[in-house]
Image (cartoon, rainbow, N blue to C red):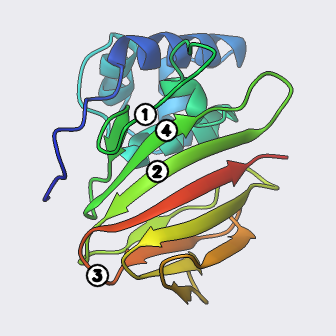
Amino acid sequence: MASAGNPSKPPLHSIAATLRRGRQAAGLSLTELAHRAGIAKSTLSQLEAGQGNPSLETLWALCTALDLPFSRLLDPPRPRIQVIRADQGQAVTSAWADYRATLLSACPPGARRDLYRVDAEPGTPRTSAPHTPGTVEHVLLTAGRALVGPADDPVELNPGDYVTYPADQPHVFEAREPATRALLASEYS
């Protein structure tokens, strides 16, 4: 996968602690959570130990199984003013597509919205399984060209175009030009 700059790796210690707390709060064993998420128990065990290199798909599957917003895995303490420069921030990459999502803003307590910067390249589309019921995504394309939206009816976007769609059904992001970038907001009900 081509990468722009040198994005930092996901914060494994934070992911490990959040997964362990979420699993324990849900009263699930390692085996049961791994089964619900469709991953190997050994993979989950490694992640809870702060080891490995989790893909975006693995982390989403775990969040869906625990009914946790994805941002809880990556949300570090923030100063009152936060600037994340292009090609910086906590990025997680797809195992199947040239696609990287960088958490830009997690919801404050009481709100249910996460904001991501997406960097994608042409090739294999990033197809997402349904998120938790009621989830809606908002995408503003900032560079390039992409097909975005429900897997069975995506919309072609050009720079400056915006689309919103239910993300509790299969959906896709397919870059049609090199260096495609977008802002993606996930809204949870």
Asked if the residue at tag 4 contacts the one at tag 2, i.e. Cβ–Cβ closer than 8 Å, the answer is: no
Q: Earlier in the sequence, mark 1 or mark 4?
A: 1
Answer above or below: position of 152 versus 85.
Answer: below
* Amino acid found under the numbered disc labelled 3: Glu
Q: Residue at x 79, y 54 (%)?
A: 133
Asked if the residue at tag 3 contacts the one at tag 1, i.e. Cβ–Cβ closer than 8 Å, the answer is: no
Q: x%, y% of residue 125?
A: 36, 74
Q: Residue at x 78, y 38 (%)?
A: 112
The residue under label 1 is 84
The residue under label 2 is 117
Q: Earlier in the sequence, mark 1 or mark 3?
A: 1
Rendered-image quadrant of the N terminus? bottom left
Q: Earlier in the sequence, mark 2 or mark 1?
A: 1
Q: Earlier in the sequence, mark 4 or mark 3?
A: 4
Q: Residue at x 65, y 31 (%)?
A: 66
Q: CA distance from mark 2 to mark 1?
A: 10 Å
Q: CA distance from mark 4 to mark 3?
A: 22 Å
The residue under label 3 is 177
- The crowd level at tag 1 (other Cα within 10 Å; few <14, some 14-19, many 20+) is few
